[in-house]
Amino acid sequence: MALYNAKRILVTGGAGFIGSHLCTRLLRDGYEVLCVDNFFTGARDNIKELLDNHSFELLRHDITFPLYVEVDGIYNLACPASPIHYQFDPIQTTKTSVLGAVNMLGLAKRLKLPILQASTSEVYGDPAIHPQEESYWGNVNPIGVRSCYDEGKRCAETLFFDYRRQHNMRVKVARIFNTYGPNMHPNDGRVVSNFIVQALQGKDITIYGDGSQTRSFCYVDDLVDGLRRLMDTRDDFTGPCNLGNPKEFTMLELAEMTLDIIGSKSKIVYQPLPSDDPKRRKPNIDLAKQELNWQPGIPLREGLTKTIEYFSRRLVSQKTP
Ligand code: NAD
Ligand code: UDP
């Protein structure tokens, strides 16, 4: 139950995949939540169970424009996260990361609030060291098709640290690695949702490249717990802090596990690798363990099973008139 006079927290991108879980968690923890979203990739469906909660408020707004509200803390998650979505309008993607950060930092500065930025493992680009630790500066193509996202997020990090240096603000930067779970967009082209939807529909499973590239997948509940803990760290802890699951899988292993859980007879087919596709990705989470006392607890098979249940329900309800 929400507390009377509870602190009011702004979640930008709150109707998106991770944002919707974060809003739910904050309400459960007794906060009031102001969810701000322009519904570019988010959906009312993701937050439909929250709309009747008197501690939850929804505001349609694009964070590339200034926002004047009264809150007690900000989680800045607004930004399309899947390559298909962030490459759809790359200029808007950079604007969302950069102008959005300026606007949200301005709000935090005026109200003297703590603010957390959802940054990304993409700041490491196609990494030359493995696993990636926070001290690594990255290997990013500044002019490629992923640059609107990677460089936008890098510039947002710069802004967060300059606001800290110039205005002594309480900033927190999370570098989020691949996260999956219910409320992922079924058509966002990300590997987990693609494989599950393809397998459930009996379509071919599309592996890009030879399937030997790796990713480390974190279940959304673990990730949200990490974000909550990061926000609650002492004022002088800023990160950047990696949040992700260090268990690494090849895309072929992910495809085989998905087929096995669903019991699907879909065939695996191989398609060309998109440009600038990182070959390996795995977080070093020593800092999160030490400062947040956090590490993921949900193994891939368990998280995939929950995610498959979500997509099965969603596909059935779409078929039902
Ligand atoms: P998502 O696309 O599901 O959610 C993003 C939300 O932001 C959507 O609801 C969208 O409508 C909203 N949005 C986009 N542009 C906006 C704007 N200009 N103004 C207001 N709202 C806007 O993506 P997600 O996976 O939930 O990612 C959330 C955040 O976490 C993003 O910042 C993303 O970069 C970061 N992140 C996610 C992952 C992952 O694996 N999911 C990994 C690294 C970082
Ligand atoms: N991928 C794939 N088949 C798909 C979708 C993605 O093999 O249908 C690959 C993609 O090329 C990448 C990995 O899976 O190597 C993860 O892709 P995703 O878009 O989920 O995340 P990101 O590349 O941003 O980590």
Image (cartoon, rainbow, N blue to C red):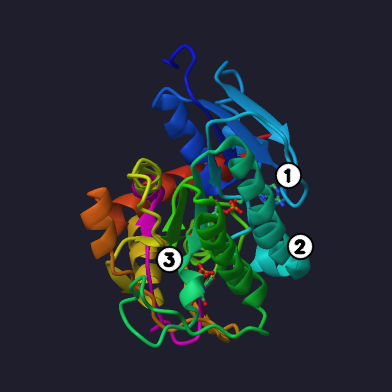
Measure the C-alpha gap from mark 3 to mark 1.
39 Å
- Which residues lie in the magenta part? 207-223
Quickly name the residue at label 1.
Answer: 38
Amino acid beneath label 2: Gln
Residue 23 among magenta residues = no
Left or right: residue 207 compared with residue 281: right
Rendered location of residue 59, percent (x, y): 71, 32
Looking at the picture, tell me which residue is in the foreground, 261 or 21: 21
Which element type, helix, strand or loop, lies under badge 3? loop
> Quadrant of residue 151 in the image?
bottom right
Vertical order, 225 against 127 (above or below): above
Amino acid beneath label 1: Asn
Looking at the image, is mark 3 or mark 1 nearer the viewer? 1
Quickly name the residue at label 2.
Answer: 92
Indicate which disc, 2 or 1, sits on the residue closer to the N terminus.
Answer: 1
> Quadrant of residue 283 in the image?
bottom left
For the point 66% across and 41% down, the residue is: 43
Rendered location of residue 24, percent (x, y): 47, 32
Measure the C-alpha gap from mark 2 to mark 1.
12 Å
Residue 287 visible: yes
